[in-house]
Amino acid sequence: ALARNEKNGIQMAMSGCFAGPMFNTLVGLGVSLLLGVWSMGSAPYAVPRDSGLFITLGFLAAALSWALIVLPLSDMRPNKTLAVGLITIYLMFLCVRLGIAMSSGS
């Protein structure tokens, strides 16, 4: 709705698509790590090794990098190149996560 109603609405809508998941990831990690460290007191806190977390952050960084490369080249206007690249990154992420889930379930 925002993209239709304002002249620069598409840019605001696109930034919201990136800012929302990035905010959730960073704040979610920050709060959980803060609570983990706080509960341990002054003892060292070991971050749990979760491959899913690193994979998710890696694909998020790949999508953001793709957007940071393609958008300036297209005068900050979303185009088919951006869309195809982001969909490809998302499908690769789904395949990797499904592959991990199916291999660990057997």
Image (cartoon, helix red, strand yellow):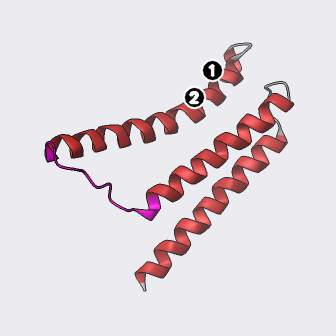
* Residue 6 seen anywhere in this rendered image of the structure: yes
Q: CA distance from mark 1 to mark 2?
A: 11 Å
Q: Quadrant of residue 8?
A: top right
Q: Secondary structure at mark 1?
A: helix
Q: Dot 1: few (<14), some (14–19), or many (≥20) neighbours within 10 Å?
A: few
44 vs 35, nearest the viewer: 44
Mark 1 and mark 2 in contact? Answer it, CB < 8 Å.
Answer: yes
Q: Which residues are magenta?
A: 40-52
Going by the numbered disc 1, the residue's amino acid type is: Leu
Rendered location of residue 96, percent (x, y) = 58, 67
Residue that lies at the very extreme toward the bottom in this rendered image: 106
Residue at x 17%, y 48% (from the top left corner): 43
Going by the numbered disc 2, the residue's amino acid type is: Gly
Query: Viewed as shown, does residue 6 lie left or right of 33?
Result: right
* Quadrant of image for the C terminus: bottom left
Q: Is residue 48 magenta?
A: yes
Please name the residue that numbered disc 1 is placed on.
2
Residue at x 86%, y 30% (from the top left corner): 74
Query: Viewed as shown, does residue 10 lie left or right of 37?
Result: right
* Quadrant of image for the N terminus: top right
Please name the residue that numbered disc 2 is placed on.
16
